[in-house]
Amino acid sequence: MSQRTLITNANLLTLAEPAPPGVGQLLIEGGRIAAIGRDLGVTDAEIVDAGGGIVMPGMVDTHRHTWQSLLRARLADGTLYDYMALARYGYAPHFTASDAELGNYAGALDALNAGVTTVVDHSHLVATPDHADALLTGLEKTGIRAVYCYGLADVPDPGAPIDTERAYTSRWRHQDAERFRTERLPADDGLIRFGISGSEFLFAPLHYTVPEVELARRLDAHRFTVHVANGPFTRGTRYVTRLLAKGLVDDRTLFVHGNTLTSDDLARIASVGASISVAPESEMQMGMGTSIWPSARHAGVAGGLGIDIVSGGSGDLFTQMRLALAAGRMAANDKLGKRGIMPEKLHLTADDAVRAVTIDGARAAGLDREVGTLEVGKCADLILVRAAATHLSPVLDPVKTVALQAGAGDVELVMVNGRIVKRDGQLVVAGSKELGTRLQVAAERILTAATDQSLDEAYSYVRAAFPLDRASAVGARVVGKALQIRGLDDKVFRMMLAQSAKAQRPAGVR
């Protein structure tokens, strides 16, 4: 007989319609929710007494670069300019395949510890086929549910100048993705699904993106995820508008950030069933602009929240919920304030935020038939938030308590697919207690390997692509317009590549 677990004395926050009221019980059997009710009369099961705590769906993180757990808080004061220079071009080349596995393992444990049971892993550290395999292995060892999005973006070679041309012409990852799909993630119903994460080709002619979308479709990727419209400097490229016009967006497309998307873009994204993930903390810190989440919701776009990078900010979705709510409410209130009007009511609610990290996030990840709510027949991915602590009592409204009062430290129990991975506030995954020293040693080696000269060169390379003053901002707008004109787009793009290659010289001052 399959393992049966009965959760009792639970304040059930199912996020389902209709929701069973009050304190009740939930029976898990064979990795799925078998029954929900006040008194199920079950006697032959392991009992988990929730003690009146809030039992809710496990959270869904729709965008995380999981490998960056080895760079924790390194970019806490960094802009997007710093991030690209340091994390992507400075430190990433020095990650070995073993580092990649360790980073993803630790990152997934960090997620589980904070009540995140599903993560869309935008895994753009595929320096070699071994890295691709190691990144997946790191996730597998934790038991987390995931969409592993094989990264097509180029990773520079350690100790060598950045090859500008290679980022746009190399195709070995396309071939390896086919191998990976066949050998590592052939199933479409496993705990981890196969996806593709695209390159950042916002400032390139569209024909560079076409092969990536075609690859994702040919391999039947669960999700094709790509960074878009992530700052005012990208507005002129109309990258998403061009993708939509060419039929390169469908219901498996997961856009990330999208801060400068237009209302027409959002309407068309909704019409084709594509989704979006926003990362409030990194977007506000790095200069990407106001979160598109409220506008996307209004347009009917399936949207979730993502951590993005723990190299910059926090690793829990409680924080992202609060930031998304606060930023969205402030933006709406400021519009009224400019007219001398005080808000009569708030249009973004705590319920909206909780749904963004549960059922709406599951929809964005394409997993809403399996997770995101507590319903009979769905996978038993759930968490227990303790409610006895002073800062959570009394629980007058579990939705508002979760959205605005609880934190990662309040997550008492985490279950994925019926398997308990955190109990009594402690992870029970093998090897999780011995991680600290390994992470410290690996991180210090990576940071040491990135020499001052290599970081200066990375900054010089990125500076050529970023509008950091008024003149370069005007230039970015001109380039954006040129990219919308066939024929001119390639000419301007070639000029940009030449400029980036020329810029690679020690800068002296970062």
Image (tube, helix red, strand yellow):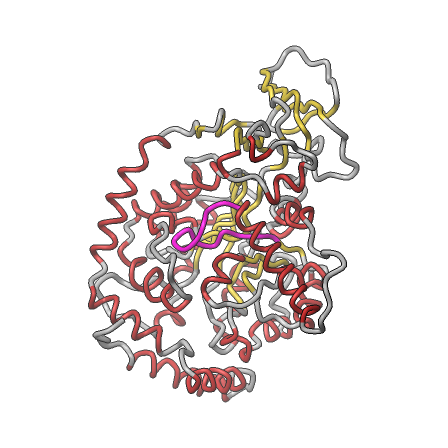
Please tell me whether residue 17 is drawn above or below residue 125 in the rendered image. above
Please tell me whether residue 478 is drawn above or below residue 383 in the rendered image. below
Asked whether 314 falls inside the magenta stretch, the response is: yes
Please tell me whether residue 280 is drawn above or below residue 441 in the rendered image. below
In the picture, the quarter occupied by the C terminus is bottom left
Please tell me whether residue 318 is drawn above or below residue 196 in the rendered image. above
Residue 325 is situated, as x and y percent measured from the top left of the image, at 62, 54
Which of these two is toward me, 382 or 104? 382
- Secondary structure that dominates the magenta span: loop
In the picture, the quarter occupied by the N terminus is top right
Asked whether 437 falls inside the magenta stretch, the response is: no
Q: In this view, does 248 lie to the left or right of 438?
A: right
Residue 41 is situated, as x and y percent measured from the top left of the image, at 72, 13
Residue 362 appearing in the image: yes
Which of these two is toward me, 234 or 497? 234
Magenta range is 304-317
> Which residue is drawn at the image coordinates 70% and 37% (left, top)?
397
Residue 233 is situated, as x and y percent measured from the top left of the image, at 49, 76
> Which residue is drawn at the image coordinates 63% and 22% (left, top)?
7
Q: In this view, does 221 lie to the left or right of 447?
A: right
> Which residue is drawn at the image coordinates 58% and 27% (left, top)?
388
> Which residue is drawn at the image coordinates 65% and 20% (left, top)?
8
